[in-house]
Image: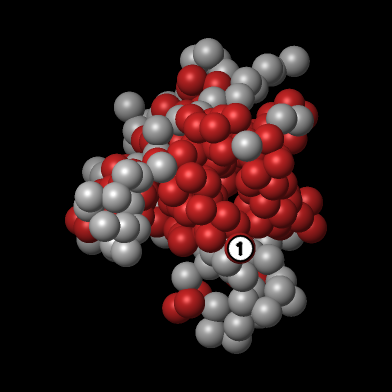
Amino acid sequence: VLRVRLVAQRPPRHALVAQQDREVPHFVHPRVPLDRRRVRQREVDAILDEKAWTLPAHDASLNNFTGRVVEVDLGAAMRGWSMATAGGWLGEGLGAARLERLQSEIRRRITDPYLRAIRNGPVGGMWWVHTNSNWNAVCHAGVVGATLAAVGDRAIRAEVVASAEANLPYFVAGFTDDGYCTEGVGYWSYGFGHHVLLAEAVSAATEGRVRLVAGPKLE
């Protein structure tokens, strides 16, 4: 039985920068003593209160915004991973109730929609599960990273990792044998960069037993 342990893996640098930019609200006077713990708690509350974590450009019908569906896109995947990491790093500093809510929102917004797509077929906004574009790697990275950091159920963590391992080959198949990416250098960096981040998170969680950078095109 593969044991997949909880891991608060470091998210992509751009996500950390976004968190740092949001950490100190602009309305705080520089000479007023700042309760950083309370600031972080307010920031977490604000993000958890957002109607949707999907990017507006990916929700033109407003189905996610209005709650008719809950799907994972590039924005939601990275938001989920960042929030799960914040929960792992700050822990009880967020307060027990807030931390429990954060973990519940990760399940509702990230892990559960992904598993529904895996079990029932990827439809609607979950089309990326079987694609060979950067969406596959980036979204899988966010889903797996968030789940490893915030979901306590070991069976769920293992199912998410196994599903990512089964579907990432679609992404790798998008590269030619010489490593050429038809999406261009920018998307090569974006997509494959997240593939590497995902591989590192899974390696840490499985103590090196699962390697997602193995294969003829990756070694």
Disc 1 packing (10 Å; few <14; some 14–19; many ≥20): few
Query: Looking at the image, which residue is at 60% across and 86% down?
Result: 61
Secondary structure, mark 1, is helix
Q: Is residue 177 left or right of residue 146?
A: left
* Quadrant of the rendering where the N terminus is positioned: top right
On the rendered structure, is 141 left or right of 154? Answer: left
Q: Quadrant of residue 205?
A: top right
In-front residue for pair 60/134: 60
Q: Tell how many labels.
A: 1
What residue is pinned by disc 1?
A: 49
Q: Where, by quadrant of the figure, is residue 124 drawn?
A: bottom right
| Along the line of sight, the residue nearer the viewer: 141 or 23 | 23
Q: Residue at x 29, y 62 (%)?
A: 26
Report x, y in % for residue 2: 69, 18
Q: Is residue 186 above or below residue 56?
A: above
User: Compared to 57, does 89 lie above or below?
Assistant: above
Is residue 145 in view?
no
Where in the figure is residue 69, as x and y percent of width and height? 71, 71
| Residue 75 image position (x, y, % from top left) | 46, 61
Quadrant of the rendering where the C terminus is positioned: top left
| Front one among 176 and 83 | 83
Residue 7: tell me if it is visible: yes
Residue drawn at x 57%, y 55% is: 45
Q: Position of residue 123 (x, y in %)?
A: 68, 68
Q: Name the kind of residue labelled 1 in the image.
A: Asp
Q: In the image, what residue occupies the spot 23% across and 50% down? A: 31
Locate residue 14 relative to residue 144 in the image: left or right. Answer: left
Horizontally, residue 28 falls left or right of residue 44, namely left
